[in-house]
Image: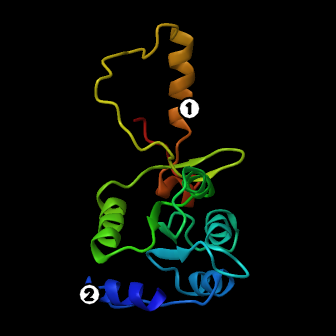
């Protein structure tokens, strides 16, 4: 599967494709080369794709905690997808897949990047994908109050851009 994935990436015109036999080797190479994209298999041993993703997102040695991670797996159950999402995976790809499936995941990462969120127990791409266009607010729910709006403003002000994460002293934009 690794060779097939490499071959597909090369047909997309990606010239520098590297591989690793497991998550440990993958993390070591990632730290050394700071890749633009990581594609990991869930079932690697001794370190699986979920553990690799968590390490990329949270380890002090990680050179880029914002790197997109595509997790490839034969499991498609909802609980597995949720587990991957909660580990900080950017995209989820079920085996067997074809070139179009992989292309769509990469295009999603490029065309619709998600902001990163940091909380006590999570760091990774915003887990919410759907954008509701029907909202005409200022308040979404019947029981929303002005105080609730203030709390939401405080929450959205805590979302970090990649630039702000790398440089904590950077001036915050007022968006």
Quote the CA–CA distance across marks 1 and 2: 42 Å
Instruction: Identify whether 74 is placed above or below 150.
Output: below
**What residue lies at 48% left-to-right and 80% top-to-bottom?**
35
Left/right of residue 118 with respect to residue 46 in the rendered view: left
* Label 1 secondary element: helix
Residue 87: quarter of image: bottom right
Instruction: Identify whether 16 is placed above or below 126.
Output: below
Circle 1 residue: 155
The percent coordinates of residue 38 (x first, y second) are 49, 75
The percent coordinates of residue 158 (x first, y second) are 56, 39
The percent coordinates of residue 36 (x first, y second) are 43, 75
Instruction: Identify whether 32 is placed above or below 140.
Output: below
The percent coordinates of residue 54 (x first, y second) are 66, 64
Q: Which of 91/119 is in front?
A: 91
Left/right of residue 120 with respect to residue 104 in the rendered view: right
Sort mark 2 into few (<14), some (14-19) or many (20+) by Cα contacts within 10 Å.
few
Instruction: Tell me the quadrant of the picture where the C terminus can be found.
Output: top left
Q: Which of 96/102 is in front?
A: 96
**What residue lies at 30% left-to-right and 65% top-to-bottom?**
104
Q: Which of 33/8 is in front?
A: 8
Left/right of residue 173 with respect to residue 21 in the rendered view: left
Scheme of image coloration: rainbow
* Label 2 secondary element: helix
Circle 2 residue: 11
**What residue lies at 68% left-to-right and 69% top-to-bottom?**
51
Sort mark 1 into few (<14), some (14-19) or many (20+) by Cα contacts within 10 Å.
few
Q: Which of 86/81 is in front?
A: 81
Q: Which mark is residue 80?
A: none
């Amino acid at each position: 599967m690794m060779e097939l994935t490499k071959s597909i990436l090369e047909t997309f015109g990606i010239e520098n494709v590297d591989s690793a036999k497991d998550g440990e080797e993958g993390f070591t190479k990632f730290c050394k080369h700071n890749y633009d994209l990581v594609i990991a298999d869930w079932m690697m041993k001794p370190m699986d794709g979920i553990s690799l993703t968590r390490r990329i997102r949270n380890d002090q040695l990680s050179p880029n905690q914002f790197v997109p991670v595509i997790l490839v797996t034969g499991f498609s159950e909802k609980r597995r997808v949720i587990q991957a999402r909660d580990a900080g995976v950017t995209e989820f790809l079920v085996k067997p897949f074809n070139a179009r499936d992989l292309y769509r995941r990469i295009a999603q990462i490029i065309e619709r990047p998600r902001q990163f969120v940091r909380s006590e127990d999570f760091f990774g791409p915003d887990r919410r994908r759907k954008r509701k266009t029907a909202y005409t607010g200022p308040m979404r729910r019947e029981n929303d109050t002005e105080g609730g709006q203030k709390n939401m403003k405080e929450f959205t002000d805590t979302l970090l851009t990649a630039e702000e994460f790398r440089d904590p002293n950077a001036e915050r934009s007022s968006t």
